[in-house]
Image (cartoon, rainbow, N blue to C red):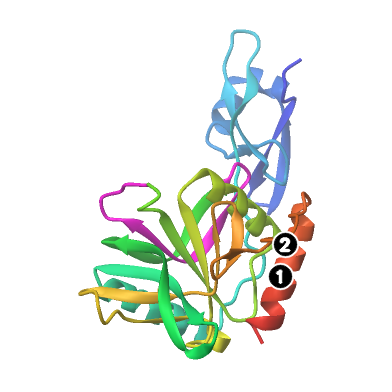
Amino acid sequence: MPLHEYAYYYKNETNDWKRVYYKELINVSSRNFLRTQNLYDSKDKHIELGIRNREDFPHFYQKRGVRRSLNGPRDSSTYHDQQRDDLLSTLEEYDNALVGFYEFTPTKTTDKSFEPITLLKKYNWNKEVTFSVAENGYVRFDLLGQAKNLCLTDKQPYFALEVVETHFSSLEAFSALIKLSKQLPLVIGYFFIKKKNYYNQISENSRRESTSNLRLTCYISDGDFWILDERFYDGRERPDNIKVYYNEVKERVTSKYMQ
């Protein structure tokens, strides 16, 4: 008995799914026809299947898992898209981007310094980039940057920006990004456009030639969600349950940065 007794393919003529059994592969014409179709383990398309022709025992085999979108609902207003495009235009205008946040002097709220998270030197940028983040799924970043020399190191990480108006990352996307950012040099910044220029901003760096300042408040890096220079659970125990972690982060973000 083969691992996959049957496969599904979509019939455009009738707009439904057709299930075929491995025994039907003995017929040469059926087998040749099915080789022209996209075959899956189920209607939900978790696994892509292929046909292996063995004498007296042709059967289906697993080719690869099928990744799906983990995003959930996303912002798509005209205002959101314009802010995304403006960010992209500014990032492309400068050779480098210094990513960081303001640190204020405790006794003088007007005294502040720009503390770096990372310096992105000579990056390529694009918008609406589909990026695989787990074995079962991908996310679509509003903006994604990669070093032009294609290096991927701690000093040259992938850098993504999520432009947030009304929707924060889904639980599935958040979970995958937290895990992946621990495994790879990957930073995901959140740019809240309802409080633009208050919690985040992009501007020219007055001290570094051909460099922009990208100021963030919230970001994912090194397997954690950060607010300025503090991990979300600094000083307290981080829960093992990622759903608890996500819900606490989402509550903080939506109540403070998205209103």
Q: Is residue 170 left or right of residue 192?
A: right
Provide the major secondary structure of the magenta segment: strand
- Say which residue appears at 57% left-offset and 38% top-offset: 37
What x and y, as percent, mark residue 171?
Answer: 71, 60
Residue 211, compared with residue 179, is above or below; it is: below
Q: Which mark, residue 250?
A: 1
Q: Secondary structure at mark 1?
A: helix
Type of amino acid at the residue the image marks with label 2: Tyr
Q: Is residue 200 left or right of residue 16?
A: left
Q: Position of residue 177 (x, y in %)?
A: 59, 54
Question: How many C-alpha atoms fall within 10 Å of the one at disc 1: few (<14), some, or many (≥20)?
Answer: some
Is residue 60 placed above or below 71 in the rendered structure? above
Does residue 29 show up?
A: no
* Residue furthest out toward the left: 209
Q: Is residue 119 left or right of residue 44?
A: left
> Mark 2 and mark 1 in contact (Cβ < 8 Å)?
yes
Q: Amino acid at mark 1?
A: Lys
The quarter of the picture where residue 1 lies is top right
Q: Mark 2 — residue? A: 246
Which of the 4 image quarters holds residue 15?
bottom right
Residue most extreme to the top: 55
Q: Is residue 52 above or below residue 182?
A: above
Task: Give the x, y percent position of residue 241.
Answer: 78, 51
Residue 137 on the magenta span: yes
**Residue 242 in view of the camera:** yes
The boundaries of the magenta stretch are: 134-152
Residue 122: where, in percent of width, then height? Answer: 26, 61
Quadrant (top left, top right, bottom left, bottom right) of the C terminus: bottom right
Q: For the point 64% across and 66% down, which residue is it?
A: 169
- Which residue is pictured at 20% across the width and 75% down the height? 209
In the picture shown, does residue 23 fall above or below 121? above
Cα separation, mark 1 vs mark 2, equals 6 Å
